[in-house]
Image: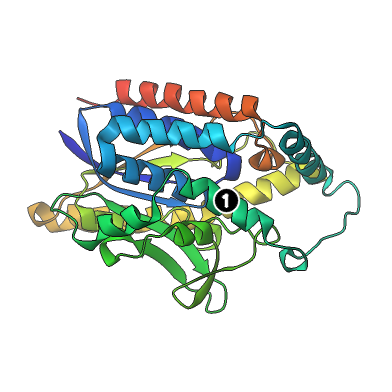
Amino acid sequence: MRTVALACQGGGSHTAFTGGVLQRLLADEDHRVVALSGTSGGAVCALLAWYGLLTGGAAEAGRLLERFWDDNAATSLGDAAANAWLVGLARLEGQVSLPTVSPYAYPGLADAAVTDLLTRHVDVDRLARLQESPPEGQPLLLVGAADVLSGGFKAFSSRRREITVNAVLASAAVPLLFRAVEEGGRHYWDGLFSQNPPVRELPDAGPEEIWVIRINPRARAMVPRSVGDIADRRNELAGNLSLEQELYFIRKVNEWADRLGDRYRRIAIREIALDLDLDVASKLDRSPALLRRLFDAGREQAAAFLAGLPG
């Protein structure tokens, strides 16, 4: 049985794909998950998977992931209208001049909504207890965020008893949409700017392989020319920058392991990548049809990934 660490890249609503991937991977009994990490929406999925594994096993983790994304969908009339308005505005960016409003200019409704959604699925007190005296073999959980003032990278760790719902909210605090989140006396923004997702601490859990769930495509076939396409590609590159740096670190250690011989072991890196053609505005889209399409695509790609693994 191979031991694996799962690293979940952030990407807003697109991480419904990650939910589907995790549901399928966790149901497979041919590998053991020793660590999970995530940033932004990937942090939400990693938290739900980790919490579910510890409280009810793989089946519970899969149920939590699916329930969360179903609950996150804009199903009421008012919520659907607000969702369509927000996504429409995002698609107009770069085509017309739109006012930019600080999230501090209005009540923190978005922060409260995400917190409420998470605490419907994760019991805050139980989450704390799971980190107090973890049994041997409990998977590691890492959540990435960026310190707004120091510019430092922060990977909240379950082994340091740092995982809270607020820490996950900090990881998902996209500037101009959310206020900076205070946690432990520091203020944090979306981990997109630091570790998307945290990878370099994953070897501490002893995985033989790291499986990366990639949301932002690494490559594009054509040079973007319209303002919207340029903005999309810029967003993708920004989302990949920190991940590529984290993976470079692991690959460099693998090179050293090759030179030093049997005393050190290589860690294989594999990827499951979202391959749907979606624009950056759809990362804000919570329409039920899109979220279901992404979740189902994640399950399908994870099944194909598992089928293609070397024996």
Quadrant assignment, res 11: top right
Residue 128 location (% of width, % of height): 32, 59
Q: Quadrant of the N terminus?
A: top left
Q: Is residue 124 above or below residue 211?
A: below
What amino acid is at disc 1? Val
Q: Nearer the viewer, residue 200 or 144?
A: 144
Label 1 belongs to which residue?
114
Q: Residue at x 26, y 62 (%)?
A: 159
User: Horizontally, is 122 left or right of 295 in the view?
Assistant: left
Q: Residue at x 68, y 56 (%)?
A: 109
Q: Residue furthest left?
A: 262
Residue 208 visible in the shown view: yes
User: Horizontally, is 260 left or right of 55 in the view?
Assistant: left
Q: Nearer the viewer, residue 306 or 125?
A: 125
Residue 122 location (% of width, % of height): 41, 47
Residue 195 visible in the shown view: no
